[in-house]
Structure formats: C-alpha cells, structure tokens
C-alpha cells in the first residue's frame, strides 16, 4: 500500500503534463488544413488542423484572432504559430494559436520572422548603430524604381517643400528575383560616390510578395553597412519590412520620407519672418537704450566739461609746483647750513693734530723699546756666560776631558754596575774625543763600593 503523499489527482496529472508539454516543445510553426472550424458566441475559434495522416485540435482565442485579417475556411491550408499545451478538463493536448496566415503568405511571413530574429540577435537593429539625419541636407539620393509612383511622390514633395535640394536618382528594380541584389548594389554605389547627404530607399505599397525585396538579407546588410544615413520608405504605414528595422530612420510612406529629409520652405519663411520681427524689436529696444545712454552722456559732458576739469587740475598743479619750489629752497638752505657746521666740526676735530702728537709718542716709545732691548741683550749675554761657566764645571764632557769615560748599553742606558750587562752584549763607550763600540766577552767580578 503506497503512502497517500505519492498519489496524484487527475487534475494534478494533467497540470504536470501541461507543464511538461510547454517546457519541452514550447512555441512552434505548423502548416496544415483546417477542418471542423467553429466560432461560438465567445468569439474564440476552434478547429482541427490536419494533414494526410494526422490531426490535432486547435484553439485561437478572441484577443489573438481579431488580428488575423481573414476568417479561415474548412479545407484551407494555413500556417500557424502555436504553443503546445493540454486542455486539462478533458485531458486532451491541443494547440493554442496566436498567429495564423494563409499558407502561401504564411511561408513568407515565417521567413520574415526567422530573418528578423537572426538580425536582431546579431544587433543590426540596435539604436547605437543608427545615424542621425544631417541638419543641413543639400543633396538627397533616391533608390527606387525610375517609373514607380513612389519616385513621383517624393520628387513632388521635395520640389514643393524645398526647391533648393539637389536630387540624385539611383534607379533599380523594386520587385522580382533580381530586385534585392540591385537595391544592395545601388546602396553600395551611393556610398562609394559620396555625392549625397542622405539616402531614401523604398517603393510604394503592395502585398507581402510585392515588398519582399526589402525583406532580403542582402538588402538589410547593405543598409547596415552604409556610411550614408538611410531613410526606409517601403509601402504604406501598416507595412513593416526588415529594411525598416535596419535603416537609420523609418518613414511610413515615401511621401513621409520626403518630408523627413526636406525643409518646408513656407515654414522656413514663416520662421525667418518671425525671427526678423524679433530681431527688429530687439534692435529697436537696443537703439532706444543706446539713445537714452547717449543723452545721459551728453548731459554729463555739458555739466562736466573736460576743459573746466583741466583748468582746475592746472591750477592745482601750479600750486603744487610753487609749494615744491619753496620746500626745495628751504631744504637746500637747511642742508647748506648743516654742511658748514660739519665743516667747522671736521676742522676742529681733524685727526691731523692727533696724528702729529701720536707720531711723537711713537718715536719716544720706539727709542725706549730699543734701549730696553739692548739692555736686555746685555743682561742676557752676561747671564749666558755665567751659566755656561757653571755648566762646564758640572758637564760630563769636562769629566771626560780628565780621562774618564761613559759606557751605555744598546738601549742607551748608562752602565753603572756589571749586573746591567751580559756576556755577548754590545756596549758603547764614550771618550773625550769619540766613541768605542765593544762586545762583552767576559765579566771578571762584581765589585762593591
């Protein structure tokens, strides 16, 4: 017996299956034949989609089918975009459809969606790559059929709005198997020549098949690679093409594109007139203010004439000049008196007198110094003779003269006892008239005093 927690209800099972279908398959494109079509009062569509060997129940709810643009019929081949799900009340799996088209147009629409998704993922629709239209457009390039109504409409509007614009036509097919390649080539030629400021690429309205050249990848990549800003103008306002998503600017119609790249002359004239009026008013106001300032300055000039100011300044200058002259005279007189006083002081305190007196003192001191030096020399000589005599009386040399000698060892120490030397040592003996170098060969005895 299993535990109750592992037992599912039918509702739980159907919910699990529904979730599994949605996660595993998700949204798909499917083509088949309609049968058993019904449309109850709720507005929803219910039908069976089948092929030669199988069928599946389908539902398309009111909020989706009102955009279909047609009412399906039994036996009609259609292309649908649907989500695989489960109708839980009956436990039957079904398709919930959000888009439906007749099979022919549906294949083109599927190709459109696939290319759109591819280019979107590559970033060709990103706004960062889109160029702004130039402010002052002088030359407009038009890539379209030379015989189409779109070219006529564009030229008429440009001529009416801004006759000064220069137009360059790059004729090309806009429908058929070779149209996409020609459109891409013309975009490349216009970029190579660089003879216009902006390009209009487009054509008039038509079916999806008629507009298909502007859904080709070669055209999309040529538009993306263009250095010139491109305005896409394909079909009518309800039509969207891949070119619209890649182009720098999308216009609802060729006529709208012409209005985007041109300036309305009448509007420009009106704006110029308004600006002229504003400028005139501003100039009137400016001149009025200048006139008021001029009158004010004229009044000030009359009341404060420069000649009067100059005369006043001149009188003041003369007064300053006289005062300066008087001050200079007083200053010079004062300096002259002070100079005379200093001359007298200088004569009275002249160093010449001191120099004569001091010269005499110096001569006297010099003579005294000479006398003292001579006296000192005489006394020093007498002392020297006396001390020399005393020194000679006690000098060892005098002793040597009397026949004595002095013996020293190798360290120049005087030998007084035989114990100070050993046999074999060298000794020096000093006599009155020289020295003897000897070697001790024997010591005979030690004598006591």
Image: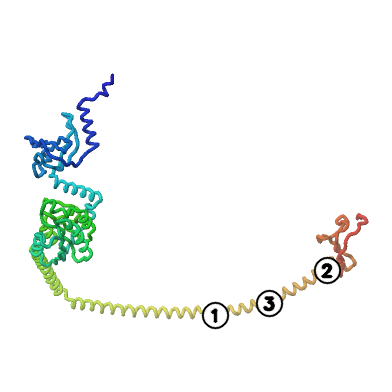
| Left or right of 87 in this view: 373 | right
Q: Name the residue under label 2.
A: 392
Which label lies toward us, 2 or 3?
2
Observer-nearest of 315 and 339: 315
Q: Indicate the secondary structure of the residue bearing disc 3.
A: helix
**Label for residue 353?**
1
Who's the residue at 12% across and 63% down the image?
146
Which label lies toward us, 2 or 1?
2
Asked whether residue 156 is in view, the answer is: yes
Who's the residue at 21% across and 33% down the image?
18
Who's the residue at 23% across and 64% down the image?
192
Tell me where residue 214 appears, x and y as whole percent. Answer: 17, 54
Q: Examine the rendered structure and indicate whether residue 448 appears above or below residue 193.
A: above
**Label for residue 370?**
3
| Left or right of 260 in this view: 423 | right
Q: Distance between the residues labelled 2 and 3?
A: 33 Å
**Quadrant of the drawing holding the N terminus:** top left
Residue at the far right: name it.
444
Q: Distance between the residues labelled 3 and 1?
A: 26 Å
Who's the residue at 32% across and 77% down the image?
327
Tell me where residue 259 appears, x and y as whole percent. Answer: 11, 59
């Amino acid at each position: 017996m299993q535990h109750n927690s592992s037992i599912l209800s039918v509702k739980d099972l159907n919910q699990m299956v529904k979730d599994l279908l949605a996660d595993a398959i998700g949204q798909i494109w499917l083509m088949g034949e309609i049968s058993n079509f019904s449309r109850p009062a709720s507005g929803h569509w219910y039908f069976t989609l089948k092929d030669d060997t199988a069928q599946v129940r389908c539902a398309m709810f009111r909020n989706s089918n009102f955009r279909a643009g047609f009412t399906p019929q039994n036996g009609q081949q259609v292309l649908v975009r649907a989500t695989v799900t489960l109708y839980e009340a009956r436990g039957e799996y079904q398709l919930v459809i959000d888009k439906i088209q007749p099979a022919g147009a549906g294949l083109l629409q599927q190709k459109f969606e696939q290319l759109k998704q591819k280019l979107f993922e590559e970033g060709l629709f990103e706004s960062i790559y889109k160029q702004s239209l130039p402010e002052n457009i002088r030359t407009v390039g038009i890539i379209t059929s030379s015989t189409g109504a779109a070219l006529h409409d564009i030229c008429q509007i440009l001529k009416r709005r801004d006759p000064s614009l220069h137009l360059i036509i790059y004729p090309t097919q806009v429908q058929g198997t070779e149209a996409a390649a020609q459109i891409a080539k013309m975009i490349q030629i216009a970029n190579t020549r660089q003879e216009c400021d902006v390009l209009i690429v487009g054509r008039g309205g038509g079916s999806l098949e008629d507009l298909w050249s502007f859904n080709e990848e070669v055209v999309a990549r040529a538009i993306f690679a263009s250095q010139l800003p491109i305005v896409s103008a394909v079909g009518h306002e309800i039509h969207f093409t891949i070119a619209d998503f890649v182009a720098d600017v999308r216009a609802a119609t060729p006529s709208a594109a012409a209005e985007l790249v041109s300036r309305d002359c009448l509007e420009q004239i009106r704006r110029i007139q308004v600006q002229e009026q504003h400028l005139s008013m501003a100039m009137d106001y400016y001149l009025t203010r200048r006139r008021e300032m001029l009158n004010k300055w004229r009044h000030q000039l009359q009341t404060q004439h420069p000649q009067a100011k100059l005369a006043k300044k001149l009188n003041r200058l003369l007064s300053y000049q006289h005062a300066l002259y008087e001050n200079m005279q007083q200053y010079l007189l004062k300096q002259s008196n002070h100079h005379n006083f200093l001359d007298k002081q200088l004569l009275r305190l002249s160093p010449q007198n001191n120099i004569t007196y001091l010269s005499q003192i110096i001569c006297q001191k010099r003579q005294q110094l000479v006398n003292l030096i001579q006296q000192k020399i005489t006394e020093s000589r007498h002392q020297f003779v006396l001390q020399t005599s005393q020194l000679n009386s006690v000098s060892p040399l005098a002793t040597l003269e009397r026949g004595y000698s002095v013996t020293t060892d190798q360290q120049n120490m005087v030998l007084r006892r035989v114990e100070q030397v050993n046999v074999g040592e060298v000794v020096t003996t000093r006599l009155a008239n020289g020295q003897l170098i000897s070697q001790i060969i024997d010591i005979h005895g030690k004598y006591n005093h």
